[in-house]
Image: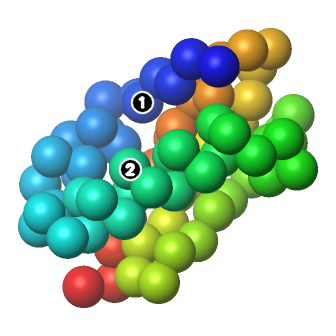
Amino acid sequence: MRVELIQPAANVLFDVPDETHAEIIALIDAVTEDAETRSPSLAAAFGEWCWLVYSVHGDVIEVLDVGCAR
């Protein structure tokens, strides 16, 4: 499974503190490895403080938005 981040999501990912950066990466890992969390349409994954919005296109997960409440 390949992961692509659109530019605004990538910008947020690199601007968050290290602990929230790690949580976002963990969410991306969970989405790529857990077949039940993958959806062919728009979907979201939530951690303790962070979230990501993504869609699946074949073997590509496109991360559309990421954010943190901290």
Q: Nearer the viewer, mark 2 or mark 1?
A: 2
Compared to residue 50, the image places residue 40 above or below, namely: above
Residue position marked by numbered label 1 in the rendering:
5
Residue plotted at (15% across, 46% down) = 14
* Residue 66 shows up from this direction: no
* Residue 47 shows up from this direction: yes
Q: Amino acid at mark 2?
A: Ile
Residue 25 - label: 2
**Residue 29 screen position, x and y as percent:** 53, 44
Residue plotted at (24% across, 85% down) = 70
Residue situated furthest front in the rendering: 33
Mark found first going from the N terminus, 2 or 1: 1
Check disc 2 and report its element: helix, strand or loop: helix
Residue plotted at (51% across, 46% down) = 28
Compared to residue 8, the image places residue 67 above or below, namely: below
**Residue 64 screen position, x and y as percent:** 51, 41
Q: Is residue 42 left or right of residue 62?
A: right
- Which of the two residues, 13 or 27, is positioned nearer the viewer here? 27
Residue 15 - label: none
Q: Amino acid at mark 1?
A: Leu
Q: Is residue 25 left or right of residue 59?
A: left
Residue plotted at (25% across, 49% down) = 13
Quadrant housing residue 44: bottom right
Q: Is residue 62 left or right of residue 8?
A: right
Compared to residue 28, the image places residue 10 above or below, namely: above
**Residue 56 screen position, x and y as percent:** 74, 29
Quadrant location of the N terminus in the rendered image: top right
**Residue 23 screen position, x and y as percent:** 36, 65
Q: Residues within 10 Å of mark 1 (few under 14, many from 20)?
A: some
Mark 2 → mark 1, Cα distance in angstroms:
12 Å
